[in-house]
Amino acid sequence: MGVRVAVPKEVASGELRVALTPEVVPRLVKAGLEVVVEAGAGDGSRYPDAAYLQAGARIETDRSALFGTADVVLKVQIPAVAETAAMRAGTVVVALMNASRSLEQVAKMRDQKVTSFALELLPRITRAQSMDVLSSQATVAGYRAALIGADLCPKFLPMLTTAAGTVRPGRVLILGAGVAGLMAIATSKRLGAIVEAYDVRRAAGEQVRSLGAKFLELQINAEGSGGYARELTEDEKKQESEMVAKAVAEADIVITTANVPGRRAPLLVRKEMVERMRPGAVIIDLAAESGGNCELTKPGVEVDVHGVRVVGPLNLPSQLPFHASQMFAKNVESFLKLLLGPQGALLTDYQDEILAASLLTRGGEVVHVPTRDALAAASKGPPA
Ligand SMILES: NC(=O)c1ccc[n+]([C@@H]2O[C@H](COP(=O)([O-])OP(=O)(O)OC[C@H]3O[C@@H](n4cnc5c(N)ncnc54)[C@H](O)[C@@H]3O)[C@@H](O)[C@H]2O)c1
């Protein structure tokens, strides 16, 4: 029998996505893999068991058998401690681990001698684009954010000329024009809004303009390595803040998506700026999970400040689970191909740059150094 790939139902609260969709199954089966899907794993994202069966997968109702006999476990989110406990040593797990914020689960994978790959650690090189789960899920998040903004806004977004008078178009401001920000711009434009955007990377300007939005220019360029942003100096932060304050005050909807990898999200929208916004205005803070771009954001909660609503939604990709899962599954399929040797067996040497960068735990060790350091610091406890 070939390599056995298990796809469990996600157990994290509110998680509707599934790591593998039926569309991908026939290609894996053709490559000699055996695909076993937990009963109901695709229900949340509307992929019924019957579709997996028809695609050539087997449906498993016994969770401990699913985990205990798998060679590879594909998940959206890091396995819960109890899930890892049911795995054999050497089982390969591929998921979005959110390692720095999931130390207990990482420690369990280490102790169980599981080989785990964290998809958020993939290098952002051209060859890894087809596996880039951060990009595919950010695309979903940006789209959802624009729709939530439009939904909460008490105004039309398009300009209307009607017998009942003329309606001026709504104004949407996007802070952070990376993958999610660009999708939020495109979606808001399609709804007819006037869209402005700002990013510290000057290269984003061209992409913003090509979507028909206005790019707010600051005379600095903070493009760091690998296409990510670097942190700004104090003086740069002040200039940025003044420009952003003006744009925020004029906006009906502000969508913030700014992140700097490995750090707290930059604080772009201060309390005073929110107080200057018009009643009815909405802020959707996509950085809520990494500390928030708005000072008043409360993750997962809607805050009302004199009629301005500040929303920090959690796990937006799970709100569009059908396509979020479809894209995730394609990413995982590409990653899986890297793990297989020419005869369809699992590789055991991870010299490939992509595998090496995303390897989190192996053989009882945490291989990823920042996570290993974080675990060591956590085990020492807080400083006295
Ligand atoms: N495989 C690849 O080559 C690859 C894959 C994905 C992304 N990228 C590049 O990386 C870019 C960013 O990716 P992401 O969306 O995942 O990034 P991200 O989620 O880390 O950050 C979102 C955006 O916030 C911006 N930002 C950071 N600090 C800011 C501040 N103080 N004010 C305003 N904006 C700020 C960043 O520049 C980025 O555009 C992409 O647009 C792309 O150019 C390359």
Image (cartoon, rainbow, N blue to C red):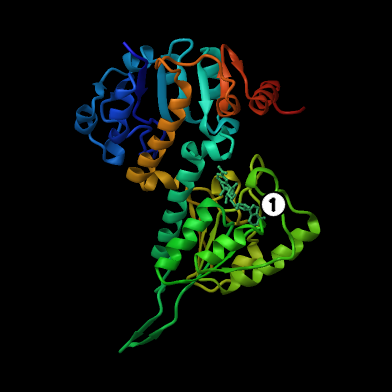
140 to 95, vertically: above or below: below
155 to 229, vertically: above or below: below
Q: On the picture, is 152 further left or further right than 45? A: right
Q: Quadrant of residue 18?
A: top left
Check mark 1 vs ligand 1: CB closer than 8 Å? yes or no.
yes
Q: Dividing the image into 4 quarters, which one contains the N terminus?
A: top left
Relative depth, front residue between 242 and 191: 191
Relative depth, front residue between 264 and 354: 354
The picture places residue 201, in percent across and down from the top left corner, at 66, 56
Q: Quadrant of residue 74?
A: top left
61 to 213, vertically: above or below: above
Q: Which residue is mark 1?
A: 223
Q: Quadrant of residue 226?
A: top right
User: How many residues crowd mark 1 within 10 Å: few (<14), some (14–19), many (20+)?
Assistant: some
Please count the marks in the image: 1
Kindly state the secondary structure of the residue where label 1 is placed: loop
What residue appears at the point 69 percent right and 51 percent down from the top-left corner? 223
What residue appears at the point 64 percent right and 72 percent down from the top-left corner? 246
Q: In the rendered image, is residue 283 in sight?
A: yes
The picture places residue 90, in percent across and down from the top left corner, at 48, 12
What residue appears at the point 65 percent right and 45 percent down from the top-left corner? 264
